[in-house]
Image (cartoon, rainbow, N blue to C red):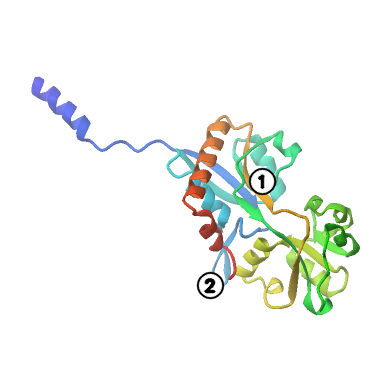
Amino acid sequence: MKRLLLACVLGALLAPPASAATTAVHACGGANEWPPSSYYQRRDDKVTHEVAGFSPDVLGAALQGSGFEPHVALLPFARCLADARQGTDMQIVMAAFHNEKRAESFLYSDPYLALVPRAYFIAGQWPKGLGLTTLSDLASLRLCGLNGISYAHLGPAADKVYTGAADYSALVRMLQAGRCDAFVESQEVINGFRLLGVPELSGTLLASAAVPGVPPLKAHFIVSRQYPQAKPLLDAINGGLRRLQREQRLAPMLQRHQAH
């Protein structure tokens, strides 16, 4: 009996540890694609159903070893927000900007992506450039924008943006038709679309100018307050983001999703 007991104890000590249980969490971004944050992978010039992007890469790396296992999907953005707000089938929204109303329903992570706005225009129509020296100069231009997108960061020009375009290709067509002078988007997003080979945004058709007085826009992961483990999940994300920053891994991860 003693030998049997000793064998059982030794067996327990020598046995490999059981893998820690993981909790699945679900994150979403917009189905219209918003590189470099998230988009559908291309293979042989065809769009697949596989989600790629800086945000999935960062979320996976940040939560590695935390006990949370992320799964990512792209949905119509309004649905992404609505589902994540409930905290049941979806818990995380990727690359969200801060606003007070949204903060009532979500906890915000540390920022992990900084987006630098630029004004894009047809190079041949403005051979001397736009001549922007202050943010208020934008208000003298006819600006186009995407339907449903807030341009509040553009100050006095925000209320004058014609948000009638469904996508970036439509924005470029509006510039070509002379319906507007320029549109404002971050250089990281345009570089992401160029990486994907979107023809309207590639080549030398477009030129760009810095937008004066607008600091980089900061994007966050946001976690539903209704999710029972919201605080531990947020702590795990923030701990992982700080680790990635210490290890200087964020910039190289972003470069993988940018045209060069």
Q: What residue sits 53% from the left and 51% below the top?
A: 58
Number of numbered callouts drawn: 2
Task: Tell me where residue 196 sits by quadrant.
Answer: bottom right
Secondary structure at badge 1 equals: helix
Task: Tell me where residue 7 sits by quadrant.
Answer: top left
Q: Amino acid at mark 2?
A: Asp
Q: What residue sits 67% from the left and 56% below the top?
A: 115
Residue at the outermost top position = 1
- Residue 196 in sight from this viewpoint: no
Residue 217 image point, x, y percent: 70, 52
Q: What residue sits 62% from the left and 72% below the top?
A: 197
Q: What residue sits 63% from the left and 60% below the top?
A: 35
Tag 2 residue: 44
> Does residue 13 appear left or right of residue 109 in this picture?
left
> Does residue 259 appear left or right of residue 146 in this picture?
left
Task: Tell me where residue 93 sits by quadrant.
Answer: top right
- Residue 39 in sight from this viewpoint: yes
Tag 1 residue: 80
Residue 154 image point, x, y percent: 81, 54
- How packed mark 2 is, by other alpha carbons closer than 10 Å (few <14, some 14-19, many 20 or more), is few
In this view, 213 is above or below 98: below
> In which quadrant will I find the N terminus?
top left
